[in-house]
Image (spheres, rainbow, N blue to C red):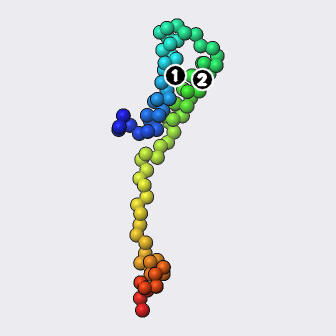
Amino acid sequence: LTKVPASTATTVTLTEPAIATLLAVLIVGERLEILGWAGLAVIAVVRVILAVAPTNADEHPPVPTAAPDNVNAAREPSLQRS
């Protein structure tokens, strides 16, 4: 779990109720009303969207650049050249 990104862990955790519901229907013989099936469908659609959505994990953070010498000289008069 320490090597899994937080977004992935959250997605998996939020899927657990749907899996428990499906197992209850398949194994125990529970009956779902239309609202329960609609909720499972919403969870399935969101999972598909999250699976195909582009991520920014491949992007590298911008590399900071050094400020030009004349920026510091303009702020501090003691650094100005004569």
Q: Nearer the viewer, residue 13 or 46?
A: 13
- 20, 77: nearer the viewer: 77
- In this figure, which residue is indicated by the disc labeled 2? 39
Number of on-image labels: 2
Kind of residue at badge 1: Ala
Compared to residue 63, the image places residue 54 above or below, namely: above
Examine the rendered structure and indicate whether residue 1 appears above or below residue 36.
below
Q: Indicate the quadrant containing the C terminus: top left, top right, bottom left or bottom right.
A: bottom left
* Mark 2 residue type: Gly
Task: Using residue 32 as the reference point, say whether residue 74 is left or right of it.
Answer: left
Residue at image coords 51%, 35%? 50
Q: CA distance from mark 1 to mark 2?
A: 8 Å
Q: Position of residue 36 (x, y in %)?
A: 60, 18
> Looking at the image, is 6 positioned above or below residue 40?
below
Tell me whether the residue at label 1 lies in contact with that at label 2, contact meaning CB atoms closer than 8 angstroms.
yes
Q: Position of residue 28 (x, y in %)?
A: 49, 8
Question: Would you call the spot at circle 2 few (<14 residues within 10 Å), some (14-19), or many (20 or more)?
Answer: few
Tell which circle, 1 or 2, labels the residue nearer the N-terminal end: 1
Label 2 residue SS: helix
Which residue has dot 1 on it? 18
| Disc 1, SS | helix
Q: Position of residue 81 (x, y in %)?
A: 41, 88
Position in image of residue 52 (x %, y %): 50, 36
Residue 60 falls left or right of residue 53: left
